[in-house]
């Protein structure tokens, strides 16, 4: 087995998959996008509208673009994706008015939807071709670890860039460089990974195919449970993750920690937070890379559910630690949640890979992404409402109990549904 892992590690295309994720996550602008819009004079309401425009565009186009990738080519979809990203960065650089920022957000969202699920589907296809499909947890965990390393590098470098560039808008021009490298990398992928099933673009055939694929996906009860579990877990994590930041900021300020003496306190807080997140991503990368080792003792589906239950337990514990003002424990639990989130994703990819049709992979993974958006749309305002009405601690308690109850249903009927298995 170790010889096989060594062979996979040396494979040229696997290395391309890894560097794709690394370059993709070099989003130097990400920690500062909100601040950038404020610097342009946009109101909080206008910034909220911009983010809503992005999420609505993603929600509407997520599944259609997944079907497009399955039908008309995955390489084409990724080339459209990175072209859209680059155009959006140029628009953000020149943005002075709300309308241009809104157009930039729409084009950025196009990049998101053409990318979502497409690259994972290409990895599946390559592993099948090489006879390595059973090792998809190992391979995806490895490629995802490079993505997280990219996020870590971006977190550290963005601090340097923001402190040294003449204006914040130049961060978008810097980000174009790794995205051009990813565009070139995708061009170098073998043509057989394009896997188009339709030669001519037909609107009628596209809609017929869409209906057929959705019937097939939702007719698979086990796969539907997995997709709901995946989207709920990721959606809830994304909903709550920013609520910890004020606690971290308060801890940094109260501790009097200063890294650069000549910088104002707020700038020092940003630098320290950037370093903290950079460290988080390094450990998350290791968790993603090594989670496959647990498959020797327990299968991916059981691990998935175990981590979901553990997330619920941690949320309940957060209720007590926040109430008791044990901020260091809160941050430690937050760190554990990050590790679990990035360890769980390869497990989801492994389980989905065993239970979906070959020609529906990008579509299935797009459904997963859309479900995640729905979860965030529902739970973000609910979590905020409970936090405002009662407290963040109570919101964590209610969410934790909700997770433990819902996962009981998602784990139910597994034996019955195991008959749904496609190759």
Image: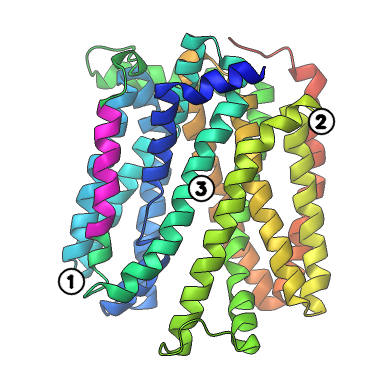
**Residue 109 x, y percent position in the rendering:** 34, 48
Q: Which residues lie in the magenta part? A: 173-187
Q: Earlier in the sequence, mark 1 or mark 3?
A: 1
**Residue 126 x, y percent position in the rendering:** 45, 17
**Residue 392 x, y percent position in the rendering:** 70, 72
The magenta stretch spans residue 379: no
Q: Residue at x 41, y 52 (%)?
A: 55
Q: Which mark is residue 412?
A: 2
Q: CA distance from mark 2 to mark 3?
A: 33 Å
Q: Earlier in the sequence, mark 1 or mark 2?
A: 1
Residue 403 appears left or right of 374: right
The magenta stretch spans residue 177: yes
Residue 378 in view here: no
**Closer mark to the observer between disc 1 and disc 3:** 3
Q: Which mark is residue 148?
A: 3
- Mark 1 sits on what residue? 96
Q: What is the secondary structure assignment of the residue under circle 1? A: loop
Q: What is the secondary structure assignment of the residue under circle 2? A: loop
Q: Earlier in the sequence, mark 2 or mark 3?
A: 3
Q: Residue at x 30, y 30 (%)?
A: 186
Front residue of 182 and 116: 182
In the displayed structure, 57 sits above or below 408; it is below
């Amino acid at each position: 087995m170790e010889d096989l892992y060594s062979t996979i590690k040396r494979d040229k295309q696997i290395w391309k998959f890894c560097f794709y994720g690394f370059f993709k996550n070099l989003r130097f602008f990400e920690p500062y996008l909100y601040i950038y819009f404020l610097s342009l004079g946009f109101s909080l309401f206008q910034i909220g509208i911009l983010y809503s425009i992005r999420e609505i565009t993603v929600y509407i186009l997520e599944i259609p673009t997944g079907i497009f990738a399955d039908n008309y080519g995955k390489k084409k979809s990724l080339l459209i994706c990175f072209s859209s990203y680059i155009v959006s960065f140029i628009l953000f650089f020149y943005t002075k008015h709300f309308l241009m920022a809104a157009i930039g957000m729409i084009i950025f969202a196009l990049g998101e939807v053409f990318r979502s699920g497409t690259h994972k589907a290409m990895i599946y296809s390559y592993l099948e071709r090489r006879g390595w499909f059973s090792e998809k947890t190992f391979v995806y965990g490895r490629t995802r670890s490079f993505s997280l390393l990219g996020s870590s590098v971006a977190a550290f470098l963005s601090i340097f860039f923001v402190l040294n560039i003449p204006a914040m808008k130049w961060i978008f021009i810097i980000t174009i460089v790794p995205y051009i490298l990813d565009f070139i990398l995708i061009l170098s992928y073998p043509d057989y990974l394009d896997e188009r099933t339709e030669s001519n673009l037909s609107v009628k055939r596209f809609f017929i195919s869409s209906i057929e694929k959705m019937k097939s996906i939702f007719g698979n009860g086990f796969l539907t449970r997995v997709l709901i579990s995946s989207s709920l877990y990721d959606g809830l994590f994304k909903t709550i993750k920013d609520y910890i930041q004020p606690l971290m900021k308060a801890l940094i300020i109260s501790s009097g920690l200063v890294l650069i003496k000549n910088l104002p306190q707020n700038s020092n807080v940003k630098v320290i937070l950037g370093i903290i997140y950079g460290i988080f991503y390094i450990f998350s990368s290791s968790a993603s890379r090594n989670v496959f080792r647990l498959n020797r003792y327990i299968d991916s589906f059981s691990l998935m559910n175990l981590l979901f239950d553990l997330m619920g337990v941690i949320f309940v514990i957060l209720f007590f630690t926040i109430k008791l003002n044990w901020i260091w424990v809160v941050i430690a639990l937050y760190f554990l949640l990050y590790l679990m989130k990035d360890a769980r994703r390869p497990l989801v990819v492994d389980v989905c890979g065993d239970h979906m049709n070959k020609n529906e992979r990008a579509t299935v993974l797009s459904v997963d992404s859309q479900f995640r958006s729905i979860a965030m749309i529902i739970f973000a305002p609910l979590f905020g409402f409970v936090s405002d009405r009662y407290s963040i601690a109570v919101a964590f308690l209610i969410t934790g109990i909700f997770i433990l109850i819902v996962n009981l249903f998602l784990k139910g009927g597994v034996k019955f549904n195991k008959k749904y298995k496609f190759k």
